[in-house]
Amino acid sequence: MSPTEAAALAAAYTLAAALASKTGWSAMASAFRQAGVETAGIILLIGAATPLAFLLATDGVARARPV
C-alpha cells in the first residue's frame, strides 16, 4: 500500500467513524471547516514563498560571496 492509498483509507475510515458516532452533523461540519481554514493558510504560505524562492534563484543569491 502506498502512502497516498493509506491516507485515503484513513480518511475514509475517519469519515465512517464520524458518521457512525453520535456527534452530529454540525460538529463534523465544524471540523471540516476548521481543516479547510488551516489548509488555506498553509497554501497561502507556500504561495507567498514560491515567488521569493524564484527571485532568489534567478538573482543568484546562493552564488554571492559574503563580504
Image (tube, rainbow, N blue to C red):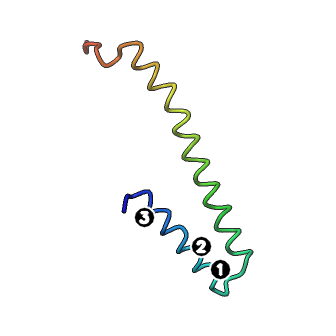
Q: Secondary structure at mark 2?
A: helix
Q: Earlier in the sequence, mark 2 or mark 3?
A: 3
Report the residue marked by disc 3.
6
Report the residue marked by disc 1.
19
Q: Residue furthest right?
A: 26
Identify which residue is drawn at 64% across, 54% down. 37
Q: Nearer the viewer, residue 64 or 47?
A: 47
Q: Secondary structure at mark 1?
A: helix
Distance between mark 1 and mark 3 Cα atoms:
20 Å
Cβ–Cβ under 8 Å for marks 2 and 1: yes
Give residue 56's quadrant in the image.
Answer: top left
Q: Earlier in the sequence, mark 1 or mark 3?
A: 3
Image height check: is 52 above or below 31? above
Q: Nearer the viewer, residue 37 or 9?
A: 9
Report the residue marked by disc 2.
15
Image height check: is 36 above or below 60? below
